[in-house]
Image: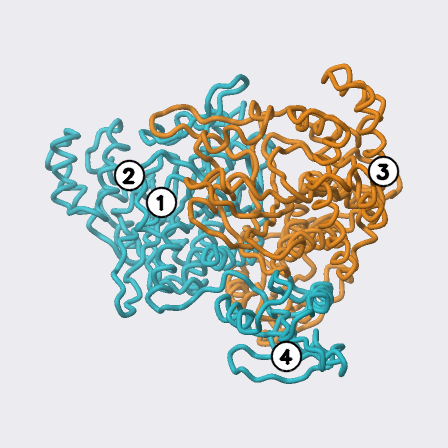
Chain colours: A cyan, B orange
């Protein structure tokens, strides 16, 4: 949890920096809300037992509940984040950060706006978060569903096979083109020459130059959807350059994304290499963030089908937790699980009352303080407790100190002790632990 | 959510001040873990559908999962907090903050310690939180299960009726003694003279003097359990006096608490009066925090029955949300849902690129900034957006400012505008919005 909180802090801080408000939705939705949104993965949805009342299921992601929420509350305009757990009856793979219950961290912008400005901000947010987390170099692959569909059309894929061929393309980050082609031809009945034409496209990736080049492509330039997608990508790259993140972005024609609801730009961030600390095995963590534009989903929940264009991103925090934990283990860095600034201790017996009085004074002054729950603890045990839990200071009370109106303040690290006047103790602890004022 | 976050901040800040670490447990538990822990309320447990694998239920509170967690991980010693949602198939009552899905905020101290030190800290925490939240005057009722049981014994209640008579006593905060007596005699078959003896006790409340008095009580002083409970309460009051909160505490013999698992001290905080702002109806919110000692629960999950003594508290945040929301509504105080410090705006057209560059600079410097997602928004619309969302500053870019290397910084409240050199802008925004450095 200590690692998780550090990661969440970075993410929430970034979401707030971009002006998002936070929303919450229930952990369960009406079963019908989730039906028909996730393709064949629907079998992974957890249902609640029918104990009377509505049929309910645990949420599978945060995007569908968000779209339901927008439609139900007739919202046409919101920038929100949502950090919560989602549920999938999948095979867990702990080392890769894949669980049945896991966190998603979503940021979405809903509303009718000028093209590519919110989309560019989503990519900026992704880059800011991945940079701040210091989990190594990363690359954000970008594509557009309209370019994919246009490409399938000009290659000669029948309309009915767009989505299934799209799923095959999506596997290119894991398997070779040969295998993908075999699947397209063997399993999905595509003509080999059609597959080869797709192969020529999807093996390309690059920057804005590739966008320009494809806008000149004799076939693609004849397809309205593809031209729209490419035009938007060109604009997107302009904005990304202004944001100073164009070097992190790769236009990658093999990026397809599994979910059905995307309608425009799609993106996925992958780590380029793991931090190579001594003794550390590279983790196969796959993508660590992803998202895209989904302009049709909200309309599915509105009785009149009113659309609300949306674009968003989701940070794959469980994978990030795995990476950060493994890095900390490799560094043998101990993560403190509490924030206690000072332990109130005594060297002599019969000072429980004095310890209780002092710790209470410190709490009331906003200092994070603890004491051992023993009437007469040994000083050594008290010091050991600080070593174990990382408490930096000890406020030691003794008979002499009580007479002199002072407290002995000891630094656990340096073992130095100084007498501090009792009325100055709070200020001195604040100064030493550098705790900003007015902040929790 | 904005109100909730403010309330959570106060609570988490206090839990951390007392040296707690945070833990998390899954939203569902094995069905058998929850079975037999909640008495007749077990019918309110949500079960998951049997889709293969283990039979699961949604957690009903955070205490049973905590005890299960301690036993499973063989922990004998921890001070933790846990803030999460729990689930009950109950009749919701929105105005009183009663829902089927709701938050609990629990703090617990597990471990074998000297008597009453952790118990006193739990009461101190309750008082700190309720004071910080500024939701009005409150009183914490305290009693002890051993005193109740001893009292039942000396009054002549048969052992088998202890728990059911305890439930009747628990109703004394809602109905009169006459009604409770009728239930005891009519429904539960207690002899009227036994009920009357109970009545003499449970209508008493007071401070440490009442504890002293009952220690001299001819009947109670003969009961071992009661004497233990009273002795501990006396010690507790000593510690509460050192903590400066004895004036908030009332020893109340009618406090019984519903849950079966308590074994020692029990407590419940009630609001004495609602803040009486104009136009505000007092809410029937009942108790806002409660807890107690449960030394037997962890042992129920340990294969060898090893006990881990625990004491804890739970803050009834949903009720507190209702109160805080109602108070803010009465005050017509608008709660900001975002933290944006500055809107990047322009007065002239064709400055989208400059706006994007500036907002990106601000984000990279850690400033919370937004811009409207329009190519050429009107200045009026940009200022209106600030008014609506509470953004205090506007950074306005114009052709002239660009030439001069300055940004016009406008205060939304005062409408004052000053030119700030671009390189000083971040510092000036920080200064004006008083954002502490080094903090998210």
Q: Disc 2 on helix, strand or loop?
A: helix
Which residue bears the numbered disc 3? B204
Viewer-proximal residue among B150 and A197 = B150
Crowd rating for badge 2 (residues with CA inside 10 Å; few <14, some 14–19, many 20+): many
Instruction: Tell which circle, 4 or 2, labels the residue nearer the N-terminal end.
Output: 2
Task: Using the image, name the chain to which the residue with label 2 belongs.
Answer: A
Q: Nearer the viewer, mark 4 or mark 2?
A: 4
- Cβ atoms at labels 1 and 2 below 8 Å apart: yes
Q: Disc 1 on helix, strand or loop?
A: helix
- Tell me if residue B271 comes above or below residue B245 in the rendering: above
Discs 1 and 3 carry the same chain letter: no
The disc placed on residue A229 is 1
Q: Please tell me how many numbered marks the rendered image carries.
A: 4
Crowd rating for badge 4 (residues with CA inside 10 Å; few <14, some 14–19, many 20+): many
Task: Using the image, name the chain to which the residue with label 4 belongs.
Answer: A
Discs 4 and 1 carry the same chain letter: yes
Task: Using the image, name the chain to which the residue with label 1 belongs.
Answer: A
Q: CA distance from mark 4 to mark 1?
A: 65 Å
Task: Using the image, name the chain to which the residue with label 3 belongs.
Answer: B
Across and down, in percent, residue A293 comes to 42, 42
Q: Quadrant of residue B144?
A: top right
Which residue bears the numbered disc 2? A150
């Amino acid at each position: 949890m200590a690692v998780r909180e550090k990661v969440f802090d970075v993410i929430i801080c970034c979401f707030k920096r971009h002006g998002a408000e936070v929303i919450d939705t229930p952990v369960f939705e009406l079963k019908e809300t989730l039906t028909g949104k996730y393709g064949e993965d629907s079998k992974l949805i957890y249902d609640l037992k029918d104990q009377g009342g509505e049929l309910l299921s645990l949420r599978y992601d945060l995007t569908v509940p968000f779209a339901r929420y927008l439609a139900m509350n007739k919202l046409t305009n919101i920038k929100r984040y949502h950090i919560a757990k989602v549920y999938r009856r999948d095979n867990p793979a702990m080392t890769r950060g894949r669980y049945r219950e896991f966190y998603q961290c979503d940021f979405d912008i809903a509303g009718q706006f000028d093209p590519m400005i919110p989309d560019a901000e989503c990519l900026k947010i992704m880059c800011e978060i991945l940079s701040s987390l210091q989990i190594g170099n990363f690359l954000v692959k970008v594509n557009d569903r309209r370019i994919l569909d246009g490409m399938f059309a000009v290659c000669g894929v029948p309309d009915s096979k767009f989505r299934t061929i799209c799923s095959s393309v999506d596997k290119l980050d894991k398997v070779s083109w040969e295998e993908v082609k075999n699947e397209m031809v063997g399993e999905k009945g595509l003509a080999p020459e059609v597959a080869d034409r797709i192969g020529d496209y999807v093996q390309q990736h690059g920057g804005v130059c590739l966008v320009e080049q494809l806008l000149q492509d004799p076939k693609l330039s004849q397809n309205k959807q593809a031209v729209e997608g490419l035009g938007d990508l060109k604009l997107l790259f302009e904005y990304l350059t202004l944001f100073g993140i164009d070097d992190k972005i790769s236009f990658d024609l093999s990026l397809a994304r599994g979910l059905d609801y995307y309608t425009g730009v799609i993106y996925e961030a992958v780590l380029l290499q793991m931090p190579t600390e001594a003794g550390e095995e590279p983790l196969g963590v796959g993508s660590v963030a992803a998202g895209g534009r989904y302009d049709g989903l909200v309309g599915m929940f509105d009785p009149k089908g009113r659309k609300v264009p949306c674009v968003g991103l989701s940070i794959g925090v469980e994978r990030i937790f795995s990476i950060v934990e493994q890095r900390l283990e490799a560094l043998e860095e101990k993560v403190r699980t509490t924030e206690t600034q000072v332990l109130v201790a005594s060297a002599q017996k019969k000072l429980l009352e004095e310890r209780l009085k002092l710790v209470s004074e410190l709490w009331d002054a906003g200092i994070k303080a603890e004491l051992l729950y023993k009437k007469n603890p040994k000083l050594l045990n008290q010091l050991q407790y600080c070593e174990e839990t990382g408490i930096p200071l000890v406020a030691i009370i003794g008979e002499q100190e009580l007479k002199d109106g002072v407290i002995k303040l000891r630094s656990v690290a340096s073992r130095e002790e100084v007498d501090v006047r009792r009325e100055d103790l709070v200020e001195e602890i604040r100064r030493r632990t550098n705790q900003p004022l007015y902040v929790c």
